[in-house]
Every structure is written in C-alpha cells, then in structure tokens.
Amino acid sequence: MHVAIVGGTGAFGTALAKRLTEAGHEVVIGSRELERAAAVAAEVGAAGATNVDAVKKADLVVLATKAEAALDTARELRIALASKPVVSVASELRFTSGGVFPTTSAASLAERIQAELDAPVVAGLHSLAASTLAAAEPPDEDALVCGDDQEAKELALELATALVSGRALDAGPLASARALEGLTAVIVNLNKRYRGHAGIRVTGLP
Amino acid sequence: MHVAIVGGTGAFGTALAKRLTEAGHEVVIGSRELERAAAVAAEVGAAGATNVDAVKKADLVVLATKAEAALDTARELRIALASKPVVSVASELRFTSGGVFPTTSAASLAERIQAELDAPVVAGLHSLAASTLAAAEPPDEDALVCGDDQEAKELALELATALVSGRALDAGPLASARALEGLTAVIVNLNKRYRGHAGIRVTGLP
C-alpha cells in the first residue's frame, strides 16, 4: 500500500520507512522541509515530500511527529487528509527524577487528534522502539493497534504485520489508546530498570 | 509473608489466595462479612476475617474489591492500615457496545487510592485474570508492578513472583498505573476479539 509518514524524519519514522519499504510498501516520508524529507528518504529507499504532498497519494498516513507537535500537525493537515485513515503512534511522556510518567490528560493523544480531524484515527505501534525497528531482524514482539473505524484499523494492522516477528493485534476501540500510549512510559521505565529493549508479547490467544 | 486480601471473596481474590497459600504465604481473606470471608477462605486453605481484622497481621495488603468499591474501602481502612503497604489491582472499565473502555479519569484508580491513605500504594497484577490464576499451572505471563515506594514495591514483586511462570517486573513509578489499569481494558478487548485468555510477556529484557 501507499504509506505516508508525516513528520517522519526522526529515528522512529526513518526506521519505519525502511522496514515498510523492504516489505514492499510504497513509502513517502513527509516533513515541513522538503529538502530534509528528501535527504532522509534517500537513505532508506523511500520518497520524500512536504507533509501536505506526502499524504496526497497515501492509502494510510502515519503521524510520526514528536508528541508535542502531533496536534498542531494534525490541524494543519486536516483539509489535505480529508477522510484518509491516520495512525497515531506518539505518546506524551514526562521525564522526571522518579521515572517516566504518562500524560496527565484524561483523553489519550490519539483521541485528541481524532477530535481535530474528519479522517478516522487509529492508534498503535507504541510498544515498538526505533532501535528495534531499525535492527536487521524484525523484533520479537507483537504490535497492538486500536481504533473505532474497522476499515482504518484493518489497514493499520496490515502495516503492523510487516514490522514485527509476532502478530499485529486488534486491541479494541480508540479508547484503548490510553493504555497503549501509557505502555510507552512503562517500556521506557523497564528499559531503564533492566537495561534492555522491552517489547510486548500477548500470550494466551489462539 | 503475611498477606491480607481485602474484599477478597470474589473470583480474583479467591484465586490469588489459593495460589499464594500454595506458594507458602500466610493468607487471610477479608470481607465486610466475617461469615462470607470464612466460608470462601476455607475452600482455598486460607484464613478468613473481617477486612479490619485481616490487615492487622499483614505484611502486605492486596485491595481486591471491585473497582467501584475500592476508594470507599480504602477510606474505611485508612486507620487500620496505618503505614502497611497496599497493592491496588483493580481497573475501572466501561462496557459498551463498541468494546471495553478504560476510565475517563485523568488519574489512575491507584493514584486516587494513594490520596486517601497514609500507607504506600503500589499497583499491579492487572494483566492477570482470575481464570488463569485459578488454573492448575501458573500462567505463561509476566506480572507488572509499579509504585513510588521502593520497599512496598519489592514486597509486591515478591508476591507477584508466586503467581506467574514468567517474571515479576518493576514497571516504574505509581503513575505507570494509568497504563497497567488500561491494559485490563486492552486484554478484555483482545479476549473478546480472539476468544482467548490474554496475558502479557515483556520481551527484550536481559
């Protein structure tokens, strides 16, 4: 499928683009700056474009900006996105001396992004790290995706399948994003405590 | 260790008591009604008592009421608990036609319980189901525990070790409870979608 990775010049977006390109998807990395998008995209065999241009041909749009830029970027792209499905992958984290904290907002970032867009928003991939995505082999993890729009969720699950050696799993409605985004804080805390690269596997499913 | 399971006459509290008793811990199941506590406790080889009496000798207190009773029960036991460590295991869920939703409160239930108590609160075991805990073999899962008080968290991790075939893992500060409680919603949604008994394994840790 055609995948646009908006704000995709960071470590996560780049690793995602590389993995998806290798899996046979057509990937465009978007950035506010065309030159930067083109330079990063060239390194991983993807195309580069401005964010607005990147979403034009996309079947699925991954919003891969930093968490603090996600809402503004969604607002800026509302018209360009129209009804194209969007995957929100960011988590708001607070780094403190007592560990990494999840957001204090009652609603998940993905639900707040949904409130800005006409497009259906799904959330997922929060437990995947840029470092494990960029490794030679797909990581020994499952990928969790949630959303209220079934068609959008199926596309995101198809995309997620290319990223892990485990399964792409449907974690329920968009409200589950509260848990999935919070998992990023848990994973960062686990990584600090045990000096690892934590991921999630779901056991007990047929 | 001496473990009190407050409000522990439900399926989860009973399965927990059975597993902990088998592992050699001294377990008291607490209830508002002494007769009910005694009857349920007898079935699993534990002692039974009122909630207030149950916590008296405990090294660690598991708050195993239903989520909607957790705050009231914590308030009622504040004096009896004094500074004894408490483990919050409940999650507020909303069952809708579109799936199971996590709470809409900005703060986790565990953090709201902490605000009612002088005792240190840790949160954990949210991804363990009564049905898998009650099975003959420990479930193929890890158990996640979070909290701000290191001593209380170590006790809870020791308790958790007896419950799963995987590891008991320190998931960071009490703020991580937002994610761990939300995971219960994710797990219920996964169980509905895939007709399984989902649990969590963390990969990538040494």
Image (spheres, coloured by chain):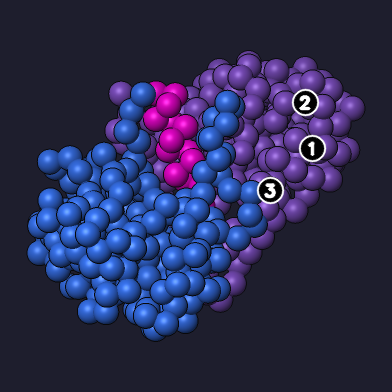
Chain colours: A blue, B purple
Which is nearer the eye, A100 or A36? Answer: A36
CB under 8 Å between discs 1 and 2: no
Residue at point 49%, 41% (across, down): A185
In the picture provided, is B12 more to the left or to the right than A29? Answer: right
Residue B108 rendering spot, x and y as whole percentages:
66, 46
Question: What is the C-alpha distance between the residues marked 3 and 1?
Answer: 11 Å
Residue that mark 2 sits on: B119
Is residue A65 at least partly visible in the picture? yes
Say which residue appears at 61% left-offset and 39% top-offset.
B175
Q: Which mark is residue B115?
A: 1
Check residue B62 in the rendering and tell me which mark sits there, or answer none.
none
Q: Residue at x 22, y 49 (%)?
A: A15
- Badge 3 element: loop
| Observer-nearest of A123 and B47 | A123
Chain letter for mark 2? B
* Label ID, residue B107: 3
Picture layout, residue B158 above or below residue A24: above
Of pointers 2 and 3, the one earlier in the residue sequence: 3
Density class for disc 1 (Cα within 10 Å; few <14, some 14-19, many ≥20) is some
